[in-house]
Amino acid sequence: MAFIQYLKFNGTSLPLPTSYDCELSAVEADTTGETEAGTTQRDVIRQGVVTISVAFAVSPTWLKKLTAYSKQDKLAVQYFDTETLETKEAEMYVDGYKAKLYKDTSYKGLWNVSFTLHEF
């Protein structure tokens, strides 16, 4: 049985994540809010903006690669869309990058890396 390829950054396949959380949200205009009559007015500009929280258990080699990706202003990301169960593409950026030593080994450890991807 083949695994799903959840993420690719700039055409490079990433390792299988330990956690993958895909969220779809809406972007609302400044005019959204409560009216004088006390009702809620919602002016949606864009639907389906993707935010992906992901975590990996990686080697030092992948730790270096993921750290380099986290410093880029934007990435061409292919991601597994949980709404359509297909791969989609978007421009995204990395936020909240965190690397934590999971286990010390003879070769620079095993690392837990987590971050959030935000669609432009």
Image (spheres, helix red, strand yellow):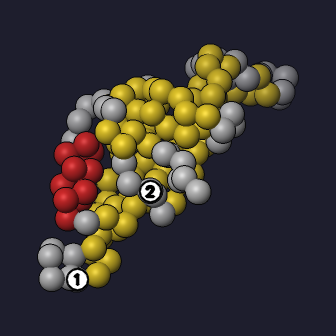
* In the depicted structure, whether residue 43 falls above or below residue 88: above
Disc 2 and disc 1 in contact, CB within 8 angstroms: no
x, y percentage for residue 56?
A: 39, 61
Task: Classify residue 21 as left or right of residue 96.
Answer: right
User: Which secondary structure lies at badge 1?
Assistant: loop
> Of all residues shown, which one is farthest toward the front?
1
Q: Which mark is residue 104?
A: 1
Q: Pointer 2: residues within 10 angstroms few (<14), some, or many (20+)? A: some
* In the depicted structure, whether residue 19 falls above or below residue 102: above
Residue occupied by mark 2: 16
**Mark 2 vs mark 1: which is more N-terminal?**
2
Task: Classify residue 94 as left or right of residue 6.
Answer: left
Q: Amino acid at mark 2?
A: Leu
Task: Identify which residue is drawn at 49% across, 37% down.
Answer: 79
Q: Is residue 94 visible?
A: yes
Quarter of image, res 11:
top left
Q: Pointer 1: residues within 10 angstroms few (<14), some, or many (20+)? A: few
Which image quarter holds the N terminus?
bottom right
* In the depicted structure, whether residue 4 falls above or below residue 75: below
Asked whether 110 or 96 is in front, the reply is 110
Task: Identify which residue is drawn at 48% across, 45% down.
Answer: 5
Task: Identify which residue is drawn at 25% across, 66% down.
Answer: 59
x, y percentage for residue 36?
A: 78, 21
